Amino acid sequence: MSIQSINVRNQFRGKIKEIIAGPVVSEVDVETPHDIVTSVITTRSVKELELQPGVEVLALVKSTEVSIARI
């Protein structure tokens, strides 16, 4: 599968660092040049995409809200 075009502007290229598989959903940690991005997706999608540690992926983030907290 190749992506021809997509409207998501927040994209992070990286490699899968770890997958914590559950019966219905799984946590997928993607190591990017800046930090770790974690996605919660269905375990079925993990299997269909043949995801495993070391696989290069593109993490796409689309949100209607971004919250800011002062530190």
Image (cartoon, rainbow, N blue to C red):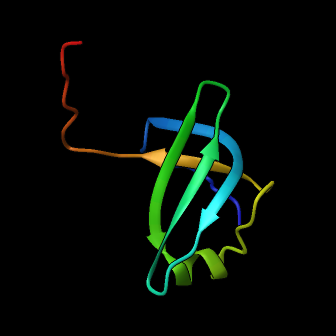
Q: Is residue 11 left or right of residue 2?
A: left
Could you tell me how many numbered marks the image carries? 0
Residue 57 placed where, x, y %? 68, 52
In the image, residue 27 above or below residue 9: below
Residue 23 placed where, x, y %? 48, 87
Q: Is residue 19 left or right of residue 56?
A: left
Classify the position of the N terminus by image quarter: bottom right
Q: Is residue 8 left or right of residue 12?
A: left
In the image, residue 45 above or below residue 3: below
- 11 or 28, which lies in front? 28
- At horizontal 44% and vertical 84% (from top left) the residue drawn is 24
- 16 or 58, which lies in front? 16
Classify the position of the C terminus by image quarter: top left
Residue 18 placed where, x, y %? 66, 57
- 43 or 71, which lies in front? 71
- At horizontal 81% and vertical 54% (from top left) the residue drawn is 54
- At horizontal 57% and vertical 38% (from top left) the residue drawn is 36
Residue 26 placed where, x, y %? 50, 71
- At horizontal 20% and vertical 43% (from top left) the residue drawn is 64
* View extreme (right): residue: 54
